Amino acid sequence: MVKMEKSSLLLTTLISCLLLGSLGAQSQEEEQEDYFKKWLQEDVIYTITEEEKDVFNKLQTPAEKERFIEQFWTRRDPSPQTSFNEFKEEHYRRVQYSNDHFASGIPGWKTDRGMIYIKNGEPDRIESHPSGGHYQRPSWEGGGSTSTYPFEIWEYRYLEGVGQDIEIEFVDPTLTGEFRITTNPWDKDALLYMPGGGMTDAEALGMANRVDRIVPKTSPMPWTNPLLIGYGRAKDQPFEKLALFTNLQRPPSIDFADFRRPEVLTNIRYELLPFEVGFDYFAVDTNNYLVPISVVVPHKHLDYKKEGDVSRAVVDLYGQVSTISGRVLSVFEETISTQADPDQIIENAQQSSLYQKSLQLAPGRYKLDVILHDANSEKVGTKSVGIILPTVSEEELTLSSIVLADRIDIQEESMQASPYGPAKVFPNVARVFENDQTLLLFYQLSNFQIDPSSRSGFLVSMAEIVSDTDKLTGEQLKIDNTNAENLERLHLIHRFDLAGLEPGKYHLHLQIEDQISQQQVERNIPFQIASSN
């Protein structure tokens, strides 16, 4: 009986722990959702663009949303090379300032003054009437005196995306401390509906009535004295006021240092649309490299849309190369499409599209950003890659980047040479091969020595596939009859049949010796073999 009671107690305790763990996990998920909801609907409600908001709402996991938030602030960082994000710090300072100074039964960030302050910062000038009372109108409001509700006028000399010489008027008609933005200068007039109260100069002379306040005149009538009667300014007209109000509702305009297109402005660091991106580099001279960029888009991740008798997938590609300091050096964009008959979609989905773009860059460090947008599904994928181009030596035996390729086509002499010299190379960017493939190794060799008497170079290139420390297969090339017309640089190719190799991780060991100068260079390139089944 005692044993049964102990077992029952143990089971009850175990169930309780499981329930508490489940409730704890559920509580944590709810806290995360509350955090993301607050961030979207409170923290950045005035600064996030519609494109960014749409993408954020489509994200599924907390990790994706966290990466989005991180990149949201990074995109607005005026000095991304530093660890301090001035934009983010200033944004939250403005939020706190609004809560401290503009609260009125609701948090300060929710008020109209809070909205304008968070978006645009401190005005260049503030005309404040915190208690209202007696007010002498300026000439452009018709002159005369009246009594007003509390009001403020904020002036900005210039706001990006809004205009210049901006006046924003806030009125507190309820006397609760909540100043509301208005487009009508008469909203602050406490005597507006009192017959004979707070008349303008023209009304007092019987030359106008209150109906004339609806559309203020922008020029004096021929029989009037503008110094006595006054007239409205062009920016006080109803349509101009409405346009100003509309522009003030938009998120603040930001000078993005990197991206210009809508897909790039959202620059989300997640992969709803997976793809691969890589680059190679080949020396042109001592000051420049030719850098081919390769983007591989697997069709299996694309959405096909029926167009007539075929189904078509379309991807918009945008990329840019910038310096570490953020200066944009090159921008490229392309539309990639693939189509198939209805009975060939499954076969087509097993293939990939390759896009290549070649740039000429000096030795140094760069940042490559690539964004893909599926036109049919609106899925977006982005990747950023660092490019490091070493100094080009004039004397030492030098290797280019090592390219592992699925296919290499030797071009005819009449054809224009590609970035890969006399060949058209299809890189395997992911470096994952199937064991029924042939692996192709491609590279460029520079600064080898030439025998003056024979005008030939004597090189030995050994490439081996290695698993752990075991050599599995290798290929040796000997070059001892170099064409005198192409002595400056050589392009070499190794071929490996992967049949019989087990799936797993391997690396290629490449060793090259210049037998004249006795110089040697070597590289290890990791790759993977997957089963073809």
Image (tube, rainbow, N blue to C red):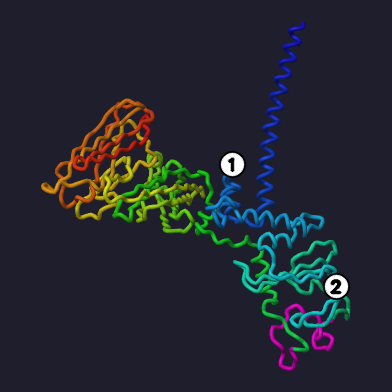
Q: Quadrant of the N terminus?
A: top right
Viewer-side residue, 329 vs 228:
329
**Identity of the residue drawn at 69% across and 64% down:** 122
The percent position of residue 465, horizontal first and vertical second, equals 30, 31
Residue with the most extreme left position? 453
Q: Is residue 223 magenta?
A: yes
Would residue 343 be seen by someone viewing this image from the given angle? no
Q: Quadrant of residue 15?
A: top right
Span highlighted in magenta in the image? 199-226
Q: Which mark is residue 364?
A: none
Is 18 on the left-hand or right-hand side of 492?
right
Q: Quadrant of the C terminus?
A: top left
Viewer-side residue, 61 vs 477:
477
The percent position of residue 220, horizontal first and vertical second, equals 71, 88
Residue 235, relative to residue 105: is it above or below?
Answer: below
Give the main secondary structure, helix, strand or loop, of the magenta stretch: loop
Q: Quadrant of residue 201?
A: bottom right
Would residue 217 be seen by someone viewing this image from the given angle? yes
Q: Which mark is residue 190?
A: 2
